Amino acid sequence: MRTSFLSVVFGLTLAAAACAKPEPKITRDQVLPLLQQEAARMKADGENMPDVGVKAIWTIVAVEAHEQPGNDAKPFKGTLRFKIESSARALGGQPPESFEKKFDYVYDAAQKKWLFGS
């Protein structure tokens, strides 16, 4: 009797596992908008720094997300590229300075968000 009961429990466990829907695979189209939002937030933060006599204009140059095959925990890596133009408001007016800045991210599947520099 005990063997029959264990067989039934084991069978039900296997059936439940077989019927469980696997979590759908996340796609680049799902995570790219989140990275674009991060770029917009960084641009706004960079341009809204306290006024210390320097004005900065951040231009988003690229928002890229690339698949990392075989890495289910962090299936995508991303890059944000900005062109930053800064000018100082000083006597004599210094010429504007321009440089590019790159930020690397990875998408964490468990947390469902992009993580900076990981």
Image (tube, grey):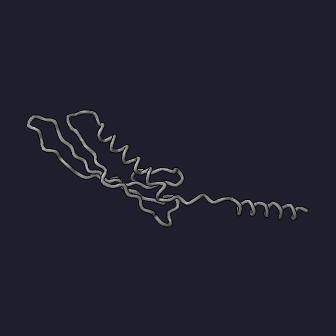
Name the residue rendered at 83%, 62% in the picture: 8
Q: Name the side, left or right, on which 55 lies relative to 92.
A: right
Q: Name the side, left or right, on which 14 lies relative to 102.
A: right
Judge whether 18 appears above or below 40 on screen.
below
Name the residue rendered at 50%, 59% in the picture: 27
Q: Give percent across and percent down for residue 3.
A: 87, 64
- Report the quarter where the N terminus lies: bottom right
Specify the farthest residue to the bottom. Answer: 70
Q: Give percent across and percent down for residue 118.
A: 42, 54
Specify the farthest residue to the left. Answer: 92
Q: Name the side, left or right, on which 57 lies relative to 117.
A: left
**Quarter of the rendering containing residue 12:** bottom right
Name the residue rendered at 28%, 52% in the picture: 101
Name the residue rendered at 22%, 39% in the picture: 55
Q: Give percent across and percent down for residue 56.
A: 24, 41
Q: Give percent across and percent down for residue 112.
A: 51, 51
**Quarter of the rendering containing residue 95:** top left
